Amino acid sequence: MLRRQARYTERIIQFGEGNFLRAFADWMIDKMNKEADFDSSVVVVQPIERGLVDKLNEQDGLYTVYLNGIKDGQPVSEHRVVESISRGINPYTEHHKYLEVSENPELRFVLSNTTEAGIAFNENDKLDDKPQSSYPGKLTAFLYNRYVKFNGDDKKGLIIIPCELINRNGEKLKEIILRYAKIWNLDEGFIRWINEANTFCNSLVDRIVPGYPKDKIDEITKELGYEDKMVVEGEQFHLWVIEGPEWIKKEFPSEKCGLNVIFTDDLQPYRTRKVRILNGAHTCMVPVSLLYGLETVKETVEDEVMGRFVEEAIYNEIIPTINMPKDELEYFGKAVLERFKNPYIKHFLMSISLNSNSKYETRVLPSLLKYIELNNKLPQKLVLSLAAMIRLFKGEINGKEIKLMDNPEILDMYNELWKNCKDEDGLKDIVTRVLSEEKIWKMNLNDIEGLTEQVTYYLSRIEKIGMDKVLDEVI
């Protein structure tokens, strides 16, 4: 049975009780409490009507985090009981308790992860709703109640750090709160208090969290010696980049216990690094590796040929296009490759192939364009990946049908193009049409010198000799 060993001051309110925050932020807070005298517990608010707070409260806020992955070059599996959550609240059934938290003079931080769609304005939200539908609506009402309770005292402002995976998340959350303040006719003093007494941070989070390990829970229960319905599994790697004033670092003592938390005045380079290297490598490898005959990320990076392809794409064609210190980028690249080799996570390539076209545009195309600008030539691995993606949308690999998921318009376009392709000229027609789709690329890629011809060449070679022989040529 799980038993609490310590209790801490309620200084944090967190919107979201899901796997990610519990294996990421709450795990960090637990470490800071035990190793850096942070003395902060978390009150978790369930952001939607149905969720996990009842189950969490049944366990007194306790749960076990399993961290599985590569650590210092070795596979490591370790676990700890996290005690940082004091209680959970469902604002749909306990609205008074939810607002009472805003009246706590010790409260200092607001955390959230309400999915990418969570930071959104809902015109139907009203101040007297119990509660508002949207997360920003709930938070606006919460902050207004605190403002009124403490008569606009600037010392009662909060540090707000959203973890939703959208760019400039803190700024967007603040914009929506100020929009609610205006349409709800809240007084000018509150708007000033939001702007001057509260600190909204942009943040970037990075940790793969597979979640509840249902396929091995019996084995885990036996190992633990107690039943835990809230077990959560994550990888060893973690990174939290927080953009905000320097003084926040003193209030959030992550450095004292060796956590990978970076405080900065400019988040953008770190976001670029993650999107281009981690996400970009994922997107780049998927069509090539699938056509090569592999199924998972781990198989890909451990295969002699595909592993070399991925490494060369990262170190030779992606990293040189990012304006950050080379040693930092190469260290991050090494960490990414270690994460890809995680023996505890089975990451299927087909699951990553979802919305491949838009992913290529945001994650890979910027590297391709910058590489051309810097070198006046095409990056061959990134171009091959583009050709392989077009080939993947033929809908079959070695005669076996595959089910692709993308925007219906894009799927219809590829279906029509491949259906009408009869010869070499047909392949060029496919490439020309795909590269011309400005809805996808935000530009006409046919305007890039040599790209149409090179993509067509690779597509033709894939069709004629197969991906294995094409890879021999490319690397």
Image (spheres, helix red, strand yellow):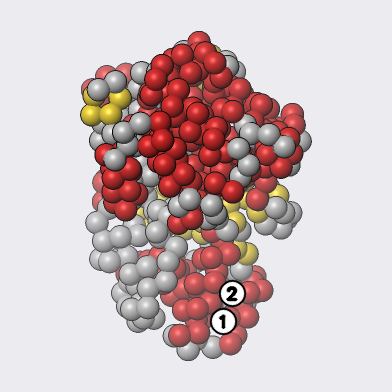
Look at the image and tell me whether residue 28 can be seen: no
Residue 282, given in percent of the width and then of the height, sits at 48, 32
Residue 43, given in percent of the width and then of the height, sits at 42, 55
Is 432 located above or below residue 235 in the figure?
below
Residue on which disc 1 sits: 190
Look at the image and tell me whether residue 471 can be seen: yes
Residue on which disc 2 sits: 194
Mark 2 lies on a secondary structure that is helix
Badge 2 amino acid: Ile
Q: Nearer the viewer, residue 459 or 36?
A: 459
Picture disc at residue 126 = none
Neighbourhood count class around disc 1 (C-alpha, 10 Å): few under 14, some 14–19, many 20 upward: some
Residue 143, given in percent of the width and then of the height, sits at 50, 72
Q: Nearer the viewer, residue 348 or 87?
A: 348
Quick check: marks 1 and 2 in contact, CB under 8 Å? yes
Task: Give the quadrant of residue 21.
Answer: top left
Q: Nearer the viewer, residue 300 or 454?
A: 454
- Give the tally of numbered discs: 2
Quadrant (top left, top right, bottom left, bottom right) of the C terminus = top right
Is 194 located above or below residue 277 in the figure?
below
Mark 1 lies on a secondary structure that is helix
Q: Is residue 401 left or right of residue 63?
A: left
Q: CA distance from mark 1 to mark 2?
A: 6 Å
